[in-house]
Image (spheres, rainbow, N blue to C red):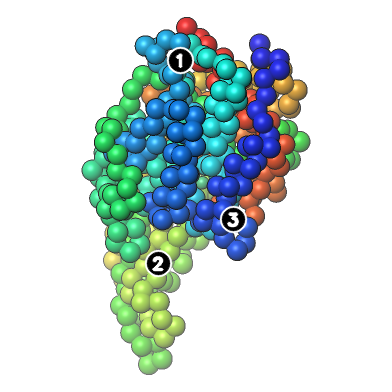
Amino acid sequence: MVSKELRVNRQRLQSTLQEMAKIGATPGGGVQRLTLSDEDKQARDLFVKWLKELDLEVAIDEMGSIFGKRAGKNNDLAPVMSGSHIDSQPKGGRFDGILGVMGPLEVLRTLDENNIQTERPIIIVDWTNEEGSRFAPAMVASGVWAGALDRDWVYGRTDINGKRFEDELIRIGYKGPVPAKKWPVHGYYEYHIEQGPLLEREGKIIGAPRGILCLHWYDVYLEGEANQVGPTPMAGRHDALCAAAEMILKVNELPERMGGNMVATVGEIQNYPNSRNIIPDKVHFTVDIRSWDDDHALKAWELVRRDFENIAAGRGCPIKIEETWRVEHSPFDEKMVQRILDIAQELGYSSLHMVSGAGHDASYMNQVCPTAMIFVPSIGGRSHVEVENTRWEDCEAGANVLLQAILQSANEK
Ligand code: GLV
Ligand code: MN
Ligand code: MN
């Protein structure tokens, strides 16, 4: 049963999100708050200030994740957790991640002003580096916290300028003292924009994903032979960029060759020396493969990997491949997913049982505790872009579902 009268404050949620959207605002209406950048620090500082205004117990762990704990009546009981991420894509949107941090903040503000105490403690969390666009891979802080990734391996990851993750964490003052090690959690809810077109297409307000696709990331490095483009005949060239171009198309064709049930993308490429009149001698590009079926994704990789090797040999361009990251598909806790659907119905919001194609920290949390997510529609299905948008009334609807879900879980004895 939902609490009849209790609702979040839409105006306050909206102005909180608008305040955050000023940090790293881009001319195109989005935000750029790359992980461990000055903008990330500024947004973290504001978040910590807001946590302290609620008298929460604030803790920063050695991965820079920020936790705010609200005491329960019985603090020996495992807490309910909810959160997401403050970092963004380059030229990203105003909702991805931050909605899932400001949403639970609004929930805690609502509980406070209504003098509501729960049985269990509630912890709100901002996970460091969910996006993985500055430092690959993604979701590293929840990954280390869950015991799935090695802290020192993540510390040593570098960005495109050779800056180390750990050094940047220290530079912005967020390498905290708390070990990044899981503790017992009663349940984790992550509130997020859908980032795809389904809810809008189906005319639904609340999405309840049954889980998240697997994510497999690879890095490909090619070597060629640089030379002056004019005098060098076409025959006998070792053009690393042409080899990459052929490989990229193989990735694009892969889902069709595999009979569907997956997506495959090359999203990032660096070409050297990147001069119009030099044959490229060094290329790096990334491959992202996702499916609900982990084996299917692995088989697809083996297929395209053989293509890569053949293309590299044919063009005389030595290839090096790094299998950077794999996270298995995550089927969420069915009872918690059903709870989201039930609450949506009780509150009068239409809903959709679906799947998340985007990765979330909920993947790693799902390895630690019962987990579910709440989605709200992305206008035009657009995300990871400056025009990413969600209607304020939908943000409010999702936050109301989150409020009731947290309350129900936090009052379970
Ligand atoms: C995370 O943003 C992802 O890549 O899905
Ligand atoms: Mn996100
Ligand atoms: Mn994202």
Query: Which is nearer the N-term, disc 3 or disc 1?
Result: 3
**Which residue has dot 2 on it?**
270
| Callouts 3 and 1 close, C-beta under 8 Å | no
Would residue 164 be visible to someone looking at this image? yes
Q: Position of residue 104 (x, y in %)?
A: 54, 30
Between residues 140 and 183, which one lies in front from this camera angle?
183
| Callouts 1 and 2 close, C-beta under 8 Å | no
Left or right: 258, with 177 as reference point: right
Element type at mark 1: loop
**Which residue has dot 1 on it?**
72
Q: Is residue 372 above or below residue 335?
A: below
Q: Residue at x 62, y 62 (%)?
A: 28
**Which residue has dot 3 on it?**
30
Left or right: 208, with 36 as reference point: right
Q: CA distance from mark 3 to mark 1?
A: 37 Å
Left or right: 177, with 76 as reference point: left
Q: Residue at x 51, y 14 (%)?
A: 118
Quadrant of image for the N terminus? top right
Query: Which is nearer the N-term, disc 3 or disc 2?
Result: 3
Q: Label 1 is placed on what type of residue?
A: Gly
Q: Position of residue 224 (x, y in %)?
A: 32, 73
